[in-house]
Amino acid sequence: MLRRYDEDNSGRPGLLLLANILVGGFEPFQNCPSEVAQENRHALAWSLQKRGGYEGKLTSLEIAIISESKQFLSSSACQKVVDAVYRGRVVYTPNAFIDILPDHYKHKPIALYDPKKAPLLNQYRLIVPRSRNIIEVCQFTVLLILYCVCMMNRDHTQFTGYEICFTVYAAGWVLDEFASMLEHGWHVHTQNLWSFLDITFVIIYTLYLIIRLHGWFTGNIEEGRQALDILSIAAPILLPRLAFNLMPENMLFISLRAMMADFTALSLIAVWCFAGFLLAMKWLSMGNNGVEPDDSPDPLTISKWMLWIWFGLDGTGIQEAPSFHAILGPVLMVTYAFLGNTLFLTVLVSILSNTFSKIAADATAEIQFRRAVLTFEGVKSDALFAYRPPFNILALLILLPLKFAASPRWFHKVNVAAVRVLNAPILLAISLYERRWLWKSKKRAPLGPLKRSKWLFLNFSSLNVHGDLQAVFDTDPPQSVLDQIEEEDELEDAILENSFAATANKDFMDRELSPGSSVQRRRRFSSVWQG
């Protein structure tokens, strides 16, 4: 049905119609019988904030993301709307689950954005997914730089200026991440490609901040050292996260997220099952061969031996197995070695290979699904997202109490004025860019690797003896050739349409003038045809 809507409605009016279908809000039990609504009244009151009649409404795009309808999201009609929302051609006010700093004085309906008629400093352009994605990459780059500078100049005895800057900025970044979790819910947020990295960093930063502040208040230098040690393990999280941002459509990263989920689930199941071997060997070692229970190997030592066997690093556990029990000890340890080092690893490799094969077999649908998730998550309704870290902390401390003291109209005015002042250079750059390039027609780039740069210092193919052959495939066809192809396609469509119409008319005439038809029917058809 969506494809038919797309085929029958072209141009900007058709885009607006598709946008109303996909991003227009509706209630899950809309138009249902009253008795059904009464039975499910507990599910109808899920929204915690009032939005003037718009609370509790969902969108087709959100439902497709939650249900992981990747074939639906990869359709041309759906991707047309997703791309328009991502670029800011289609604007609307999204419906969020919880807003930390709500500003719902104005609710913008779904419309096509005209940058030439909009104000020069339009604060609503900060929630356009493309602009917000660029801003978030810049924010994370600043966070990564401050983190590296802080760790290279670490001093556990006192707070340095670098550490204070990092701590304050990271607090604002964590607040932005927490607001993103509340915006569309946990399930949608975790569909993001790098969400598990962000959540891990939030946990590490929270532990660091608690221990660091406690050690500072109590004057415990050792706690300060431990806090910085905890913060140092965030490096394996932050560096790959930047790669995820810069290459969100790379199949390795897309498959890595799914394989990490399978690996974690299978590892937890294996640890749970193999805990029985740990208990059995610990209980066997207690009191056997005249050894006192207190002198038997502790569970940590036995776990270390089992872990070495699991990864195939060392066989100390098998050598020490007779000390548990002369017969049962070696039997248990060898059985565990077969199950853990052989069976588990084989099953793990098979599952991960199957996961990667499924994703690679439908790479286009996976990439389109990630684009939809990135677009939907980029449209924010919370006013807190208009403030860059660490100004969002000040906005939370100042504007949130003002929300309860001022009227919605005056709160909206204060919020808009603050956003425009703090983001004036960004808003001006966005406005100047969109006035010239937003609605400019552009051929959609095909899925796959990007073409090589034409800059000499990045184009290493020029050093190849077959560089001219590579240049043939990297060169785009001229616009005149593309226009000629479009004209020939339109002409071919017109010929096919006329041929189909002629065939239909001929079949109709043969049927009407056939000898089996009535005389009155043939006379009536002849008079109509001649007329």
Image: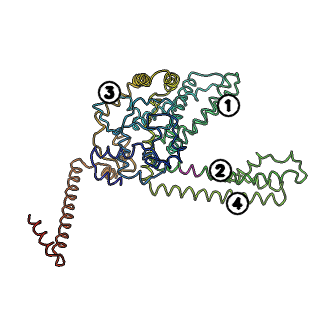
Are the residues at dot 1 and dot 4 in contact (C-beta closer than 8 Å)? no
Q: Helix or strand or loop: what does disc 2 sit on?
A: helix
Residue 519 versus residue 132: which sits nearer the camera? Answer: 519
Residue that mark 3 sits on: 120
Between the C-alphas of marks 1 and 4, the distance is 39 Å
Q: Earlier in the sequence, mark 2 or mark 3?
A: 3
Q: Can residue 327 be seen in this view?
A: yes
- Residue sitting at 57 percent across and 57 percent down? 351
- In this view, 238 is above or below 306: above
User: Considering the image in quadrants, where does the C terminus appear?
Assistant: bottom left
- Residue sitting at 57 percent across and 49 percent down? 261
User: Considering the image in quadrants, where does the N terminus appear?
Assistant: bottom left
Q: Helix or strand or loop: what does disc 3 sit on?
A: loop
Q: Which of marks 1 and 4 is nearer the N terminus?
A: 1
Residue that mark 1 sits on: 226
Residue stretch rendered in magenta on the structure: 258-262
List x then y, in percent, for residue 503.
19, 67
List x then y, in percent, for residue 155.
63, 25
Residue 116 shown left or right of residue 218 in the figure:
left
Residue that mark 2 sits on: 268
Q: Earlier in the sequence, mark 4 or mark 3?
A: 3
Between the C-alphas of marks 3 and 1, the distance is 50 Å
Mark 2: few/some/many CA within 10 Å (<14, 14-19, 20+) = few
